[in-house]
Image (cartoon, grey):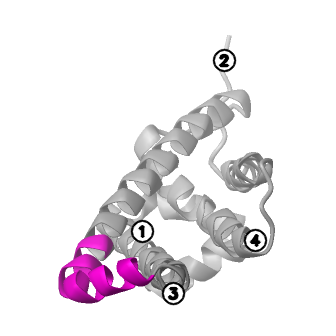
Amino acid sequence: MTVNIFQLLKASLLEPKKQAAVRILPIGKIMRFVFLFILLLTIAAFVEFTIGLNEVSGDLEGLLVYIEEIEWLLYPLAFILLFVSTTLYHFIKISLFAWIGIALVKWLKRRGEYRQLWRTAALAVTFPTILSFATGFLVENQWLPLLMSLLTIAYLYLAVTYYPKMPAVRK
């Protein structure tokens, strides 16, 4: 099964059957997708950070002077820290949803291992993460993380329904 990054992105947004199929892909392909996605999230968050910093520093003259003096150090360090923290957060999120996927597999009597569910969860979190990031600019809602988690579980549930069924137990 040869897929590129764009096909994985399309599958993560629209196709639960293909989300289930990624369980057989090599982990390297999924990792490339996850790290590229994290890089794009980091770039978007970094742009938001720099715009927000310019708005805040415009009000405080002393802060503006200080930022201009250390700008060569501030921005690269901020980007690296943002990338590391986003990576850590995203991997923890994928891992937690993979454990929820294990429960779904058992509940739906399907065959699946944690490593397969991790790959599926990596795609299942993509659309809710993008949606959460986009709506975070428009509204501040304390229920947004819960709603996005439920949406991720729904995506995971739909994908798990395409996992192979457990063989019937003969008596």
Q: Residues within 10 Å of mark 3 (few under 14, many from 20)?
A: few
Indicate which disc, 4 or 1, sits on the residue closer to the N terminus. Answer: 1
> What's the residue at 52%, 87% (across, down)?
6
The residue beneath circle 1 is 34
Q: Please name the amino acid that badge 1 sits on.
A: Val
Indicate which disc, 1 or 2, sits on the residue closer to the N terminus. Answer: 1
Give, as a single range, the part of the protein colored magenta.
61-78
| Numbered mark located on residue 58 in the image | 3
Indicate which disc, 3 or 2, sits on the residue closer to the N terminus. Answer: 3
Contact between marks 4 and 1 (CB within 8 A): the answer is: no
> What's the residue at 31%, 86% (across, down)?
65
Q: Residues within 10 Å of mark 1 (few under 14, many from 20)?
A: many
| Numbered mark located on residue 170 in the image | 2
The residue beneath circle 4 is 135
Q: Position of residue 143 (x, y in %)?
A: 80, 48
> What's the residue at 43%, 79% (across, down)?
46
Is 21 covered by the magenta stretch? Answer: no
Element type at mark 4: helix
